[in-house]
Image (cartoon, rainbow, N blue to C red):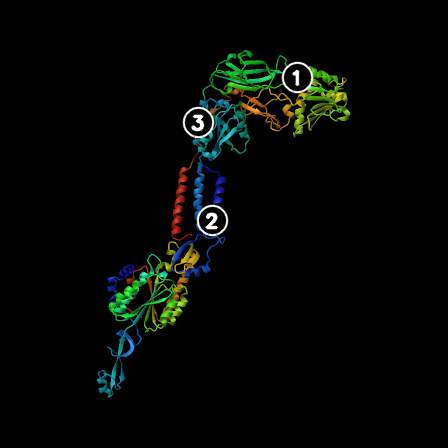
Amino acid sequence: MSFLNLGLPAVLAGLAGLAGILFVLQQLRVRHAEITVPTTLFWAAAVREAPVRVFRRRFRHWLAYLLVLLICALLWIGFAGPEVDRQGGAEHTVLFLDGSAHTSDPADFERARRELVDDVAALSPGSREVLFGGAHTLKLLAPGEDRRLLEKRLASLAPEASPSRLDEQLRLMTRNAAYPETVRVVVYGRAPVGDRTLAELPAGFSVSRAVEYEPAAVNHGITALGVGPAASGAWNRVDVRIGITSSGGASIDPGDLRVGIEGGDLGGAALAATAPGRFVLRDLVADGATLEVRIDKADKLSLDNVARLTLPERLRLRVAVAEGVDAAIHNAIRADKGLELVAEDADVLVRQAGDTRPVDRPAITLRPMADQDTAFEIAYVGERDTRQVLEASVAGLGLDQIDAMALASAVDRPIGVAVFEGAERQVSIWSELLQPNYNFVHSRSFPLFLSKSLRWLAGEQAWYAYLAAGRTVTEQSVRSSLGPADDGVLETLGADYLPARAGIVTVDGGADLQVSLLSEAVSGFSAGAAVETSAAGTAAGVPLTGIVTWLILAALLLFGVEWYLYQRGLMP
Amino acid sequence: MATQAAFDALFDPDFLTALERFRLHAKRVSPAGRHADQASRDRGAGLEFADYKPYVPGDDLRAIDWNVYRRLGRVFVRVFEERQDLPVYMLVDRSKSMFLERRPRIDAGLKAAFGLASIVLAQHDSVGLFAFSNTLEVKIKSTSGRNRLMTFGRQLACLDEAHETCLADAVNRLAGMRLRRGLLVIVSDFFDPAGIEAVVAAMKRCRHRLLLLQLSKDADANPGMHKDLHGDVRLLDCESGAGVDVTIGPAVLARYQEIYQAFNDRLAGFVQKHGAGLIRLNADGDVLEQLRALFVSGRLVV
């Protein structure tokens, strides 16, 4: 036995509350109906020995209290909606409505939605729940909730441009101790089940699909859209690579693609095919603009026909180098076309530790080993986790490319990295490391370290090779790893960041970045592992509508009894 | 019009006809009354032989018993019992409690009083009518003769609702009036706020014989019969308006019944001790039937 509208604890709590309220009301109730009688002579004498009941006196009329409590309890239980679970409550059914791009075809989604609504009506409310797997998994109906809520909640939902969350949801469910031993997951939609996920399901967990969809139709989808340094070597230009996946035996031509930047059409001439379904856009200006690629061809799914990418923004960095700084620094800066040596109005300084001029901007400071305990000291701005910053800085500034062992042997001291919070970004290194007798300035890691350090100090915007829904964000600079964490959604939080759906995400500093679907599984109509097809509509339990009726009739009968007793003066 | 309607309701020929065979007998009436049918202590002209006495000059020669003279040689005269009338005083309660409820007690009270009056007047006794609530009013001091019944009835019909019950005071006042000793019939519910003890004390002081006509209802003894008398109620006294808050339950009801029984017992005890009469008349019942049960063999001796 369970309850349709309320859980057992809520029913019991309600009963206890009713009993308490009725008890208090019984205590407080002093109802003086005024009745005119021929004389009060005898009553006055009788009351002198049995005084009238007053507030908070001895509790009386237990039977009357129990009668009223019984009536209220019957009505309360009727409201709670008792039901019988015909399978004894052993099996729990999870109905998973796929709201990912897999089922974004309107006909597919509508069919899944309709099947879901029909099946929910046939299931015992206490042993089923309904999930919606879009960009995030939503619980549409909790166990015990009235199924009439489902239609209303479904009305505002539509498939989203995101990969399927079914595998992730299945893994979470198997780890959730709240589920009973036997769980049946019924999938409504085309969301594929991974082979590995299916194989790892524990005993008692089963997955089936409610609707058998027809094989994949003709579809094209953009499954790759990434940016990288220009092959031409131009420091301020990038190449963009595009991948198209086609299913149903179809293929795509460059003429079927529309490429535009900031709303303007780039024209098919800029597009070069490198392989079937692979295209490249060369030497696009890295100015932070939004690139849009669109497939101009009718097919099954529309969500994967468009992808957008925010191009990186690469500006020439102005560096001022103080007098007395080693020539290796000058040479490395001159070699980098993204850097410009200036005497004034620099973005970043490179200076000696003994320089008496005031430091009003980020700088690389060369400090004697005698004055600095650690070979590399990095000052960052803002409250960050020091360990996280340290890990990020080693990779972000290219320190992991340095042959630390060799350097340590040469200087006869350990080579370490220290990070600390400061008012201004600073990088401080031992000045001795730049001397020719150490191999640091001759190594390949030195210009990388110098370039990355200067760009981080200048606060250059991070850029990303691609941003795909449901895939880990991989940044191409140290910017977000060491930058301030005020409002950046892409800030590392000790875990990978996965944009949930195609759209726009905002990084710290307020820049908006485009995220695209880019899913091989979606565009290729991946069927995943083979699962059984069976509807969830085998009735596991039914609400006891008849019992509710009897409960209400019993309550009404007791109302009649109370009225009769009241009229006969047998109860107060 | 209201009075006429009340009189019409009171005057029921069938009721009066049924009462014609009833007689109210006094064991002995006080002297100095009119000639009538009730036995008295007076000796004189009459039909019932009472005794002999030695002849003295002036005695009626027709009363000399010559047979005794022949046997004894002495002259005796026969003495007869003089039959006189019984003065009956109706003291009718017109307080508010008599007019309360769907079938007010006053209806039965007036009918019973009217019936008794018809019996009294039919046997040549005299009847007076006094009404009381918080004051005593003399409606008819004394009247006799069968033809005075209508007058008596009209006076009864004129009795309307007055104020509070002051029965003890009314009895005291009536006892203080210089009336010939007779039968005082008290038609009341006896719900005197002064208490039954005050009423009993007043009745003790009264020199008339007493016939108490107590008007009651079933709900008086068993208030649980009253559909509204349960639970938490505020009882309002119809006369004083004072309220009493009561939580009516089995214990209170039981205690009430004990007190009411004690009230009745006190009244009955007084009646028994002082040779008075007590008629408990159910105001909801048939008055004629209840009177018929009292007049055993058509007689009620007081």
Mark found first going from the N terminus, 3 or 1 = 3
Mark found first going from the N terminus, 3 or 2 = 2
The reply to whether label 3 and label 1 mark residues of one chain is: yes
- Kindly identify which numbered label has been placed on residue A25: 2
In the displayed structure, would residue B109 be above or below residue B29? Answer: above
The residue wearing badge 1 is A338
Q: Position of residue A400 (x, y in %)?
A: 68, 21
Q: Residues within 10 Å of mark 1 (few under 14, many from 20)?
A: some
Picture quarter with the N terminus of chain B: bottom left
Direction from residue A56 to residue A564 in the image, left or right: left
The residue wearing badge 3 is A115
Q: Amino acid at mark 1?
A: Gly
Chain at tag 2: A
Residue in the foreground of this view, choosing between A62 and B209: B209
Residue in the foreground of this view, choosing between A211 and B160: B160
Q: Amino acid at mark 3?
A: Glu
Identify the image quadrant of residue A342.
top right
Instruction: Identify the element where label 3 is drawn.
Output: helix
